[in-house]
Image (tube, helix red, strand yellow):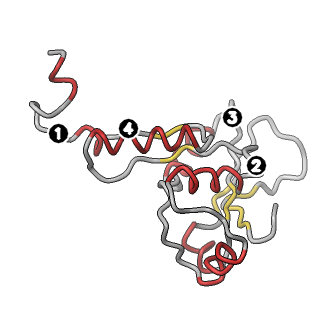
Amino acid sequence: MVPGENPLNSHGVLHPEQDPSGAQTASVREALRLGCVAVGYTIYTGTAERRLQYEQLRELKVKLPTTHIELEEARKVYEEQHIPRDTLTERVRNVLQSTFNGRRIVIFSGGAKTDDATILDEVRAIRAGGEFGSIIGRNSFQRDREQHWISWII
């Protein structure tokens, strides 16, 4: 764990077990209140409780970063260290760097309803920033039939 990181789940068993399952013990809101700059969440893939772990993690998905920095202390660090954040690609690259230089997978969750060009620009920025991907959900597909790309092939 790095300084300023808050694990959101934990595992308290001292002996090996067949299907380990951590308990969610914190929230992103609590991490922000404490001034944390990152959160951690462990998923035990292949275990009986993996679905519950994925459901809990689903509530923590990351949105694409904006230029706004909520915490004054964090804003000072960005300014003092001249961390680039003018473009979405720069901000995505910074998220990647904050995950142990890409040693953790980050999948950005979808955002508000927007036009196709903006969605494609966001996906390109994620790729250019070196991240793993984006979940594009229902907001991306809320179009009139005439406006939606799928209507072109029907």
Query: Mark 4 and 2 residues: CB-CB less than 8 Å, in contact?
Result: no
Residue type pointed to by label 3: Thr
Q: Is residue 145 above or below residue 11?
A: above
Give how far apart the Cα atoms at labels 3 and 1 are: 36 Å
Q: Which label number is shown at residue 45?
A: 3
Query: Mark 3 and 1 residues: CB-CB less than 8 Å, in contact?
Result: no
Q: Which label number is shown at residue 143?
A: 1
| Residue tagged 2 | 101
Q: Nearer the viewer, residue 119 or 110?
A: 119
Give how far apart the Cα atoms at labels 1 and 4 are: 15 Å
Residue 136 at x, y = what percent?
A: 39, 39
- Residue sitting at 72 percent across and 44 percent down? 102
Residue 56 at x, y = what percent?
A: 54, 51
Numbered circles on residues, count: 4
Query: Mark 3 and 2 residues: CB-CB less than 8 Å, in contact?
Result: no
| Residue tagged 4 | 120
Residue 146 at x, y = what percent?
A: 9, 31
Give how far apart the Cα atoms at labels 2 and 1 are: 37 Å
Q: In this view, does 75 lie above or below 65?
A: below
Of the two numbered discs 2 and 1 on the same chain, state the one appearing first in sequence: 2
Q: From the image, which quarter does the C terminus lie in?
A: top left
Of the two numbered discs 3 and 1 on the same chain, state the one appearing first in sequence: 3
Of the two numbered discs 3 and 4 on the same chain, state the one appearing first in sequence: 3
Q: Nearer the viewer, residue 78 or 142?
A: 78
